[in-house]
Amino acid sequence: MAARSNAAMESTDQEVVITRVFDAPRELVFQAWTDPKHVARWWGPKGFTNPVCELDVRPGGALRIDMRGPNGTIYPMTGVYEEIVAPERIVFSSGALDEEGNPLFEVLNTVTFSERGGRTTLTLQARVVKTTAAAAPHLAGMEAGWTQSLERLETFVDKAQEHSLSEDTVARELSITRMFDAPRDLVFEAWTNSKHVAQWWGPKGFTTTIQQMDVRPGGVWKLVMHGPDGADYPNKSVFSEVVKPERLAYSLSGGKKGTPSVGFDATVTFDAVGGKTRLTMRMVFPSAAERDRVVKEYGADQGLVQTMDRLAEQLAKMSGANRGEES
């Protein structure tokens, strides 16, 4: 049994209220809040993933979510559902835990869903009812964290409508959207020129050898990722679609040498937003079980975040080199 914290929980009246309109029916938005496999895809600030998401959605039922930050740190939280009125209202308590498993604070969350004309207005009221001195850094970012979570929820709901939550596509998918401070042509170049790809492909600590990269429909892309532990990960992809500078689609098979192969279909879209680029990468696996295996065994969700971080660094270098040529 974990030792109890010496920090006393004190009453407080800190509160955050956020209203957001979703271009989706209420039942779908409510389902995105109550199905753990969906909640795991959007819960938490940008860059966070949720390797543990357990929800017992009924009055008195418990929830447990382990949020993993971009640096790999785990932030566990627990709570209890107090009221469920489908598809209108959810009330639950939540709170982060310290390293010994003791609560740092308690928040009472009330989420209401109202529909008009096929659109859903969601109102979140998060009221801090108890806290400790050690909770201050967590609570300081509460509004920003919820805002980013709801932005991620909006992206998830949009994709769910595209592919229908009744299908299993969402459960088989691993995806990421990232805004880069670089023009679309440059981002597309970083994705399709082998000398650039070799500089950023793979999670932090990996290096990559590009053996072949023929960027055209039917073209083959072969590479070997070298892990920091010395393990090799050979991959082979075949491009099915190349629309410069808007879209790439390819199928991939590969994985750690000596282990069962991993396969998925990937699409990468490049959207120009002013002088910046919004990149979305979607990987759809043959089954939800295969997607979950890749996340569990390879940490693919966090690896994807780290890969995008490395791409941002490479784009900064490329932008700097271009400015040098111009001067």
Image (cartoon, rainbow, N blue to C red):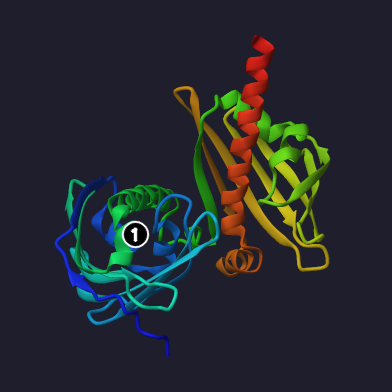
Percent x, y for residue 50? 47, 64
Q: Between residues 196 and 139, which one lies in front from this camera angle?
A: 139
Q: Is residue 86 above or below residue 112?
A: below
The residue at the point 80 percent across, 47 percent down is 223
232 left or right of 66 in image: right
Q: Quadrant of the C terminus?
A: top right
204 left or right of 137 in image: right
The residue at the point 36 percent across, 53 percent down is 149
The residue at the point 63 percent across, 16 percent down is 323
Q: Is residue 241 above or below residue 153?
A: above
Residue type (three-letter) at the residue carrying disc 1: His
Q: Between residues 15 and 157, which one lies in front from this camera angle?
A: 15
Q: Is residue 312 above or below residue 148?
A: above
Q: Is residue 296 visible?
A: yes
Residue at image mark 1: 138
Image-quadrant location for residue 15: bottom left
Q: Is residue 28 above or below residue 57?
A: above
317 left or right of 151 in image: right
Q: Between residues 182 and 42, which one lies in front from this camera angle?
A: 182
